[in-house]
Image (cartoon, helix red, strand yellow):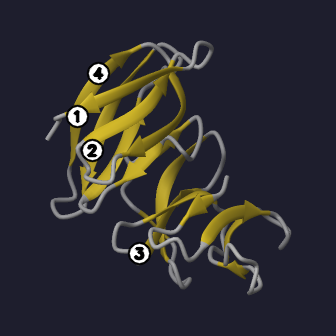
Amino acid sequence: MPAWSRDGRWVYFASDRSGDFQIWKTRPDETGRAVQVTRNVGFGAIESADGQFLYYAKNLMSSPIWRVPVQGGDEVPVAPEVRSIRLPQNAAVSGDGIYFASSPDPARQFELRFYSFSTRRTRPVARIEGGLGNGMALSPDGRSLLFCVEQRTGDLVMVENFR
């Protein structure tokens, strides 16, 4: 589960080289050694828009989303309702919040939701019929969100102008 830092200077990845899966970072040109970022398990790192924090999950299938400074430090959950479903990559971080899926049955339908960092509130964005696939990505301008529906067919869906 590799991911680039916003400035392209680091690659984040999950590894069990310390005994448990943690998030590590390294230079893409291999000029430096890998540096451990999390201490209490981590998968699927997504760097914040300002490059100050990593958002990640504590397990592969479904987990609250956590935050840690990119230099390491206190690991804290974002909010109880902010979770990854199926995979840590089923969340997307913007400058002002996190997009994530919510569902009691993500194989049949799910709701896209947005958690605002400033208000600490969650609001619905769209209700989707069909199963949640693997992965979610926000456009650089924050106006379009890509995600997969129906894992077996691999349909790619884009939600635009939802703000």
Of 163 and 85, nearer the camera is: 163
In what element is the residue under mark 2?
strand
> Residue at 41% of width from left, 75% of height from top?
51
Say whether marks 2 and 1 touch (CB < 8 Å).
Answer: yes
Foreground label between 1 and 3: 3
Q: Residue at x 69, y 78 (%)?
A: 36
Three-letter amino acid code of the residue under disc 2:
Phe
Say if 98 sits above or below 47 in the image.
above
Q: Is residue 60 left or right of residue 143?
A: right
- In the displayed structure image, the side of residue 93 where residue 58 appears, left or right: right
Q: Secondary structure at mark 4?
A: strand
> Which residue is denoted by mark 1 in the rendering?
124
Per the rendering, the mark at residue 51 is: 3
Badge 2 density bin: few <14, some 14–19, many ≥20, Cα 10 Å: many
The reply to whether the C-beta atoms of the residues labelled 1 and 4 are less than 8 Å apart is: yes
Q: Nearer the viewer, mark 4 or mark 3?
A: 3
